[in-house]
Image (cartoon, helix red, strand yellow):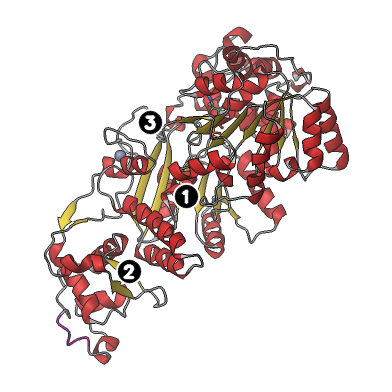
Amino acid sequence: MDFDQLSTERPTISAKDPEQVLHEVFGYETFRPLQGDIIREVVNGGDALVLMPTGGGKSLCYQVPALVRPGTAVVISPLIALMQDQVAALNELGVRAAFLNSTMDFAQARDTENALMTGELDLLYCAPERLIQPRTLDLLHHASISLFAIDEAHCVSQWGHDFRSDYLELSLLAGEFPSVPRIALTATADERTRKEIAERLSLTEARHFVSGFDRPNIQYRISPKTNANKQLLDFIKAEHEGDCGIVYCLSRNKVDATARMLSDKGYTALPYHAGLSAPDRARHQERFLREDGVIVVATIAFGMGIDKPDVRFVAHLDLPKSLEAYYQETGRAGRDGKPSTAWMVYGLQDVIKLRQMLEGSMGNDQFKRVERQKLDAMLGLCEVTSCRRQVLLRYFGDTLEEPCGNCDTCLNPPETWDGTVAVQKALSCVFRTGQRYGVTYLIDVLRGSENERIRQFGHDKVSTFGIGTELSVNEWKSVYRQLVANGYLRADPEGFGSLQLTEACRPLLKGQEPIQLRKDPAPAKTSGRSGSGSARAKISDQITDQAGWEALRACRKALADKQGVPPYVIFHDTTLFDMLERRPATLSELAEVNGVGAAKLEKYGAIFLEALNGLSPA
Ligand code: ADP
Ligand code: ZN
């Protein structure tokens, strides 16, 4: 392969119409829903607040106006580590982009500043703390600014989980640059956070664009935890062998242990948490972005702004604290629109642990009440017996008319059973033993176990001793989990998991109210992907010419390594897939492939045509 064909010169971009920019620079055929409206609004000088799910295509909403309007667009992003890749990706497209942040030395910063002053930049990425320095603001006043884009705008919200105080100061942009349009973008914002963003960023007059939250290519699955490590291994082995994924755990120790466990089984698994040194974290993130098939095991500290398009699965070994967190974390899967899995196991101990953390946390009552509601909504999703996607979307104010057909409850509808009597026994046992014991003990009493402690405490004499032999230990655990999840029992915050009755359980305790419980599926048949070889099949399953696919990937990897960028910056999987399908033989045929714009056509067209030419006929 002849890499000398790589041209280093950037073709100049002359397109001045949004559609034209979309075709010529980005190589895409049409705008996605809302993109066109948002872009028109900003191009015409209006302000916008954009709420779009991850992978929805937010970047284009400011990148296209940046290329249409005269001057430099300033993009404020909190993620210094990722600016470099974003800028590299734009440079690959022939767009003149640069960044300003604290990682660069004086000379680099001066070069960028000069380029800004002489109008040589289409986009300038800037960290918020850098932007609000008087020196930077002064510079911007002397340059020609086309627009301000405020990415990850939920960082201004104190209610959100990513609050950054620097973001609050961005409100000054409205006063300092009254005639420059501003566009704020986020993927996570309920009604309340959205209002907060609008107020704090002085965007109350801005048009709001809220696109649907559905991520149809993500398959949601939640199973009861039996043996978490084994369940995770079985899942990866059966469905995501060789794929890139993220595994989330709550604690650093568990992250380290899980990464070690996966490595022992032959996977490339890297830990990521705040206890690692900054260089280690950077190195692991880097490998995740650049290598194929890397699994990162992480606390929630990992992932914001990661725009790797081909993350095929996100697995949760611990329960997130809210649906916002769940949605955001699972949303890192499948940004390229290809089938991906959001997989989670959870059990009674998770519920108890989170409830205790919450009650024991600092924070006023108001704060705890909100957090409690959020956790309840999360647990509601876990225990629901109807379509999970409908529950998830309803929480975000979105509706899905029909069950989705791509979540575990749709694929394997869980059975329910009349739990009225069992629940009465379970609650009564809590009451009879003085509301001081945890689940294991309670189940022992119910099942009449020969247990020294039980005899010692005299609980072999209570009326609930031995009245529950009809259910297995796991079935009782499931009963208690559902009772805690649904708020009929609470875990004593100081009492090592001892369970207490709540006001809500009164009618159940008296047997006055019937209750249906979820029957946990047998652990073996968790896979929902089986069957239907529909449009949702994996990319790797759709590839008939494996050798051709490998050849194109090798070509891409060689180019990526040479340029020092992640492979997807050269071309996405979807673009390679399209190439393999269409088998273009000329540059103009190659230009038809989705994701091939003018700059990439010029730089890589010949190399890829040569690679395609060398393949055996389709
Ligand atoms: P977000 O920032 O909203 O998470 P991105 O801006 O990273 O999403 O876009 C997600 C993916 O969709 C990217 O790979 C992007 O290139 C692609 N994309 C965006 N808009 C279009 C479009 N109009 N046509 C085709 N692909 C698009
Ligand atoms: Zn569903």
Residue drawn at 37 percent across, 74 percent down: 492
Residue 461 painted magenta: yes
Q: Amino acid at mark 2?
A: Arg
Residue 362 painted magenta: no
Residue wearing tag 1: 325
Q: Main secondary structure of the magenta part?
A: loop
Q: Nearer the viewer, mark 3 or mark 2?
A: 2
Q: Are marks 1 and 2 in contact (CB under 8 Å)?
A: no
Residue that protrudes farthest toward the right in the picture: 107
Q: What element does badge 2 sit on?
A: strand
Residue drawn at 57 percent across, 61 percent down: 256
Percent across and percent down for residue 584 are: 56, 12
Q: Quadrant of the N terminus?
A: top right
Residue drawn at 83 percent across, 23 percent down: 118
- Which quarter is ligand 2 in? top left
Q: Is the CB atom of the residue marked by disc 1 within 8 angstroms of ligand 1's nearest atom?
A: no
Q: Earlier in the sequence, mark 3 or mark 1?
A: 1
- Residues 142 and 73: in front is 142
Q: Is residue 478 above or below residue 530?
A: below
Q: Alpha-carbon distance for marks 1 and 2?
A: 23 Å
Residues in magenta, as a range: 459-463
Q: Earlier in the sequence, mark 3 or mark 2?
A: 2
Q: Are marks 3 and 1 in contact (CB under 8 Å)?
A: no
Q: Nearer the viewer, mark 3 or mark 1?
A: 1
Q: Is the CB atom of the residue marked by disc 2 within 8 angstroms of ligand 2's nearest atom?
A: no
* Residue 528 at least partly seen: no
